[in-house]
Image (cartoon, rainbow, N blue to C red):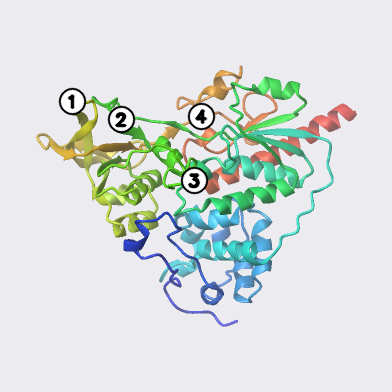
Amino acid sequence: MAINKQNHKTPMPEQEPEKRVSNFNEVAEGYTAEMAMNEATRCLDCKHRPCVSGCPVNVQIPDFIRLIAQGDFEGAYTTIKQTNSLPAICGRVCPQETQCESKCVRGIKGEPVAIGRLERFAADYCMNNVEEKITPPQPNGHRVAVIGSGPAGLACAGDLAKLGYDVTIFEAFHMAGGVLIYGIPEFRLPKAIVQKEIEMLQKLGVKIETNMVMGKILSIDELFEQGFEAVFVGSGAGLPSFLGIPGEGLVGIMSANEFLTRINLMKAYREDYDTPIRHAKRVAVFGGGNVAMDAARSAKRLGAESVYIVYRRGESEMPARLEEIHHAKEEGIEFKFLTAPVRFIGDEDGRVKAVECIRMELGEPDESGRRRPVEVAGSNHLIDVDMVIVAIGNSPNPLIRMSTPGLEVNRKGCLVVDEDMMTSREGVFAGGDAVTGAATVILAMGAGKKAAAGIDRYIRSKSEGNAK
């Protein structure tokens, strides 16, 4: 098959900015079959497959792209599913530009192959056109508990179920999906797609119990008493960080976690739901990651006239995906770079009405390798706001470690694991944001898969030892 020599990715259709800021429908509309086949023929099918080395779950990328180029979309999907249990999700939210696509040879003299878009196409095509037949494997007689139904928990549960384990997921919220449900807006990741991916796991035999706040309703020790032979902790990083400056307790200041959970999980953007949420006119979002972009773009869709993203470093230092920054700019979000808050100012009713900020300049690199922001004396100024959203990071909720004796954590409150993802407690494994702090969906999935392999080795070794 002839190589398509175009240097740029095949464009993906999108909602126009002026239209999409008034709805929560998905922004990117996906490839048609013709677009996908055209993009797939850009792949050089490299012998050394550098793109695969950039994928945390080891998807055989050239193989599935070749099948798309040949028109075998179902075969492409089946190839992806061999190592990635959530392709429709990963095709939408993974930072391919810093992972698989960053290794693509086509990116040397042009744009890399649109691996993420092709993964999404294959998954969407099969979800809409193919009835996937799933046959649960023969049970192996062993039980494993998974705490948390985010990407790490789902990946771990899926791999264990395929090996015949009796897996039960315990989820704190009333819906499964973790950050995929409560954290990422509908316009980036439709919840119906998450539900379909979860249903696939349930067909494998995975059981899900919701409204289970582990550490309160049940402890890890009680799970072992109930007959589970191993426990995987994939509870994420749901504890928000705040700025710690004067006035942060004023009405109208909230974490991005709360704001996005009300919108995404509790459907505050829909008129047929009565979830309370503040419809502000002037919103400041503090932070520079994807969560900050999601919060700002959601506030705009709720009717805010002015939305500012305030970030203490420059644009090139922002950790958010370039695609999300681009979309935010298109939608009229205003960026205030090299700016940091000093204090919040309230009105006579205790509601935030302004934030005092100071200009910054970049100094020497800090421990993260990024240049440290330094205050510019005398540059204080006010930004009028009636709502503030803080999106400067999250850490693991301490509930599980506080209720589980013997769990070792680092100074950031993250669980410490060995090469098999086992914690300091025998039989207790962990992965995803509970171990690394807030990171990406695909890295959490990779950790979940690695933990599943570790759990399998652990249980088999114990069984073999008992048999002797």
Lower position in the chain sequence, tag 1 or tag 4: 1
Locate residue 264, reporting x and y percent.
Answer: 47, 44
Q: Which residue is drawn at the image coordinates 24% and 50% (left, top)? A: 305
**SS class, disc 2:** loop
Q: Using the numbered discs, state the Cα–Cα distance from disc 2 to disc 4 in whole angstroms.
A: 20 Å
Marks 1 and 4 sit apart, C-alpha to C-alpha, by: 41 Å
Quarter that holds the N terminus: bottom right
Q: Which residue is mark 3?
A: 440
Dot 1 amino acid type: Glu
Label 3 vs label 1: CA separation? 41 Å
Asked if marks 1 and 4 touch (Cβ < 8 Å), the reply is: no
Between discs 3 and 4, the one toward the N terminus:
4
Q: CA distance from mark 2 to mark 3?
A: 23 Å
Q: Residue at x 23, y 32 (%)?
A: 352
Q: CA distance from mark 3 to mark 4?
A: 16 Å
360 or 151: which is nearer to us? 151
From the image, tell me which residue sits under label 4. 414
Front position in the image: 385 or 163? 385
